[in-house]
Amino acid sequence: MTDLPEKYKAVIFLGAPGCGKGTQGEILGSIPRFYHFSMGEAFRSMDTRTPIGQEFIAYSQKGQLVPDELTMRYFRTQIDARAALHMFKPDIDVLVLDGVPRNPEQARYIDEHFDIVQLFHLSCPNREELITRIRKRAIKSGRMDDASEDVIKKRIQNYEKETKEVLEHYAAQRADINAAQTPVEVTRDILDVIISQPAWREFYEVE
């Protein structure tokens, strides 16, 4: 049996709603030795019949925010489940984290259990562009409630409030990527960062 590393290697995708972090996470995750994990998808697929699912329901029914401790516990169970199924191989794969961490408390948990190699900040200062993207995506997927400009603006404001400190927390590992470009140009810039660093090649060549 392969010995698992003490800390799993990971990269973080961070950016406002509509910046394309899910798309870029999926693209990077399609490359061998990278595994994409979307916290949003994990929440949407949660089995509310399980004990941890019942804990989430209990907070939701009371109209309370889910504590970071519970969120991160669920996150870890999801990662470990994927490792157990050999979907994610911690000894050779780099996790691509999308949608986590969302605040400094979650970042501190991440640091205890994961080795963050890079944070890709997908930056799109043009908020009107983000609103247009989100509205188109919402209409395409049939989620008309999410197409409201007021709802979209609130989501962007919440992101800015929550994640400013996370960006500061990972300042040393941060690479700013212009998310206003076409998806293929964004992918190119992300890969340029990866290819340019010897540490990435060394890890990628480990057998």
Image (cartoon, rainbow, N blue to C red):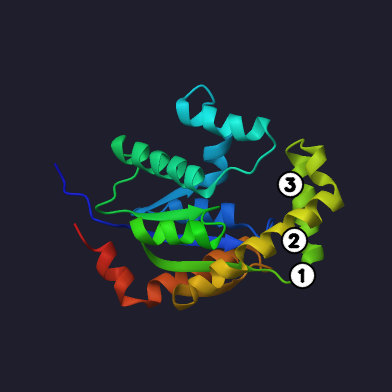
Q: Nearer the viewer, residue 160 or 64?
A: 64
Res. 114 visible in picture:
no
Task: Name which residue lies at 29% across and 69% down.
Answer: 201
Task: Name which residue lies at 68% across and 64% down.
Answer: 161
For residue 196, the mark is none
Q: Position of residue 103 (x, y in %)?
A: 56, 60
Residue designated by label 2: 157
The mark lying in front, picked from 1 and 3, is: 1
Q: Nearer the viewer, residue 195 or 124?
A: 124
**Considering only order in the chain, which callout, 2 or 3, is on the residue closer to the N terminus?**
3
Quadrant for the N terminus, please.
Answer: top left
Q: Which structural element holds mark 2?
A: helix
Give the Cα separation between the discs numbered 2 and 1: 13 Å
The mark lying in front, picked from 3 and 2, is: 2
**Considering only order in the chain, which callout, 1 or 2, is on the residue closer to the N terminus?**
1
For residue 137, the mark is 3
Q: Are marks 1 and 3 in contact (CB under 8 Å)?
A: no
Q: Position of residue 14 (x, y in %)?
A: 57, 62
**Label 3: how many Cα within 10 Å (few below 14, some 14–19, many 20+):** some
Q: Amino acid at mark 2?
A: Gln
Q: Amino acid at mark 1?
A: Asn
Q: Which structural element holds mark 1?
A: loop
Res. 101 visible in picture:
yes
The mark lying in front, picked from 2 and 1, is: 2
